[in-house]
Image: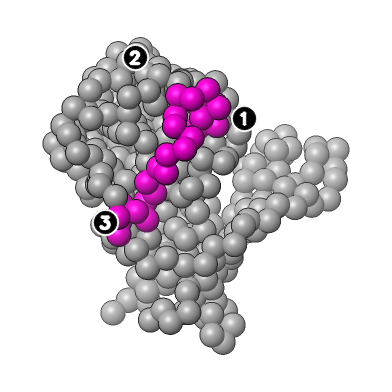
Amino acid sequence: MRIIDARSTRDALPFAQLVPALRHAFVEGCEVPPRQVHRVGETNDGACTSLIMPAWSRPGSQAAHYGVKIVNVAPGNAQHGLPGLHASYLLFDALTGVPLACIDGSVLTTRRTAAASALAASFLARTDARRLLLLGAGAVARVLPDAYRTVRPIERVTVWARAPDKANALAEALRADGFDAWAEGDLAAAVAQADIVSCATLATEPLVQGRWLTAGSHLDLIGSFTPQMREADDDCFAGASLFVDTAEALQKSGDLLGPLSRGVIDAARRHATLADLCAGRAPGRQARLERTVFKSVGTALEDLAAAVLMLDTARGP
């Protein structure tokens, strides 16, 4: 069994390969049981919550793999100078059960999340989209421009975060990577100037207002993976074409549950998923001035696809 650390995981998942690998995985499909959630132990800082996310290749697949991601969330870790989230990914041969790799799950999750947003944008963002706005300055936001650059001609990156020092630091890091990147404190102005608005925050109240979005823009919502979280107000969905990574997003995301309950989003309509887009069962953007919205909550299919690609990349030719 290979032990693959954070740096090696990052190096083995270049977006130029990861985005096509996810597209192939959404076409092929795999088995994805519901995730399990467990409270582990009880301390003065509270309980550690463990999420177990399995997926495996469908019968008859050319290569059979089985993977499990374990995500441990310990909110009290900040008091000890530790990250609040740790993740590991175990990859097995699905036929023999032989362990193949133990992978840094945090880096794997960060990169597959950004790759999924880029994959969606390849169908939904205008082909000439050049101006990217990032909301948030965390690990996912850090890699989003690199991911987007594989599918659209990104030239300008604007960064907004609640903490201006973090926005400035991320913009500086992106400039070092060759992007024309700058921090912006006026969120309304930044949204109005962006071709793609990508939100990677833990917000519980809407940040993006629909009235700020311009015709032809693409809104990418990565946070809000629980009913209590929101990044966009109702107006962001009014008059826009909505797409989701999986149907689970319509049941989990606070960004969607509220507008669904108020009739802003048509609850009776089947909203196209990434699998629909990748397989050609649904069209993506159909008009230059169309406003598109993509909402993701993540799926173990993406983890499995990234892990298999990563193992193949790490092995070399």
Residue occupied by mark 2: 211
Residue occupied by mark 1: 228
Find residue 261 and report its horizontal and vertical position in percent: 55, 27
Residue occupied by mark 3: 280
Mark sitting earlier along the chain (1/3): 1
Residue drawn at the location 32% of the way across and 24% of the way down: 239
Residue 163 against residue 252 in the figure, above or below: above
Residue 61 visible from this viewpoint: yes
Q: Residue furthest bottom?
A: 96
Residue drawn at the location 44% of the way across and 29% of the way down: 265
**For the residue labelled by badge 1, is the local secondary structure a helix, a strand or a loop?**
loop
Find residue 270 and report its horizontal and vertical position in percent: 42, 44
Mark sitting earlier along the chain (3/2): 2
- How far apart are the two marked residues, 3 and 2, measured between alpha carbons? 31 Å
Q: Which residues are magenta?
A: 256-281
Describe residue 83's horizontal placement relative to residue 212 as left or right: right
Location of the N terminus by quadrant is bottom right
